[in-house]
Amino acid sequence: MSDIEIVYLTDRSKECATRLQEKVPKVRYVSDIVPVLPDIRLVVEAASQDAARYYVPLALSAGVDVLIMSVGVFQDEEFQADTFRLAKRKGAKVFIPSGAIGGIDALCAASIEHIDEVTLTTTKPPSAFGTNSYLESKGIKASELRERTELFYGTAREAVKHFPQNINVAATISLAGIGFERTKIRIMCDPAVQTNEHHLKAKGKFGELDVVTRNVPSPRNPKTSYLAALSAISAIRKILGHSWVGI
Ligand SMILES: NC(=O)c1ccc[n+]([C@@H]2O[C@H](COP(=O)([O-])OP(=O)(O)OC[C@H]3O[C@@H](n4cnc5c(N)ncnc54)[C@H](O)[C@@H]3O)[C@@H](O)[C@H]2O)c1
């Protein structure tokens, strides 16, 4: 992005930060963002919920806009309310990209009117589940499943508790639509699939929404969907640019 002069980067692992700094000429590593905050237009959190809890209030308090990837942090209602209140008080903005799922723009628009239901069905291969204490408590071994099997159906709030890998998508949908209690999540394991598939369905006064996203892993970071990284880049382009399609 030619408009951007400098990207300040911080990471609790200096080694990771240094590796990235070597690849991108505009990146400058800082051990602490506080001294550079007055020069920053946008803080991008792409690290962890812990990082969001620390850096988001820090940036907003200084009146700097933030883009948050670890959106699962907003399952904590108190943190959510405090963050949005602080942004308002300081005249700063909180940006939450659509991340690894399509249809968030339509869900936001639809939720201006009455929504009857929002359901997300996530289908993943057995390898995506790893060790999961919820499945262990139910006596389910994902690696031994030979056919498509429902592992969970319940509220988004319960889903993020039992399946933290799904946390960001469930949180984004809940925030865009009808909240963590009314949003329903179904989690399927299917040995025949290679992608992480998200099927978002909503029904309301607007009509019906039916969107399927089949994510491939990010080439340089296999535990993250490629679309999530692309979504962050697209969001930064919108925020720093002069036109905005799909707002
Ligand atoms: N919104 C979405 O759809 C979506 C999709 C994928 C990932 N994510 C989220 O984005 C975040 C980044 O994902 P990733 O796959 O790149 O993670 P990653 O683990 O590959 O990289 C995270 C980096 O952040 C650093 N870090 C973590 N906590 C930190 C802290 N408190 N202070 C400073 N540095 C810290 C780590 O050292 C690491 O270098 C995660 O929270 C993940 O859940 C969101």
Image (spheres, rainbow, N blue to C red):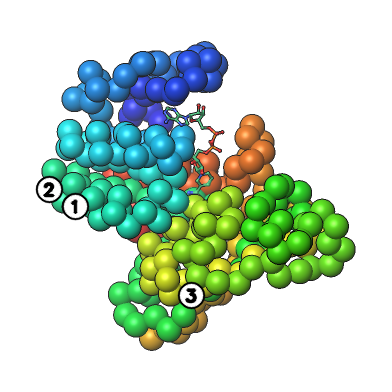
Q: Amino acid at mark 1?
A: Arg
227 versus 120 height, above or below: above
Mark 3 in CB contact with mark 1 (< 8 angstroms): no
Residue at 29% x, 22% y is 33
Secondary structure at badge 3 equals strand
Determine which residue is flagged by label 1: 85
Residue at 25% x, 55% y is 81
Mark 3 close to ligand 1, CB under 8 Å: no
Image x and y of residue 209, in percent: 51, 76
Q: Label 3, label 1: how many angstroms apart (C-alpha)? A: 26 Å
Mark 2 in CB contact with mark 3 (< 8 angstroms): no
Secondary structure at badge 2 equals helix
**Which quadrant holds the N terminus?**
top left
Residue at 87% x, 63% y is 146
Q: Nearer the viewer, residue 132 or 234?
A: 132
Mark 2 residue crowding within 10 angstroms, few (<14) / some (14–19) / many (20+): few
Mark 1 in CB contact with mark 2 (< 8 angstroms): yes
Horizontally, residue 4 falls left or right of residue 71, namely: left
Determine which residue is flagged by label 3: 118
Q: Amino acid at mark 3?
A: Val
Image x and y of residue 8, in percent: 36, 22
Q: Label 1, label 2: how many angstroms apart (C-alpha)? A: 6 Å
Determine which residue is flagged by label 2: 89
Residue at 24% x, 22% y is 34
Secondary structure at badge 1 equals helix
Mark 2 close to ligand 1, CB under 8 Å: no
Q: Amino acid at mark 2?
A: Arg
Asked which quadrant contains residue 148, the reply is bottom right
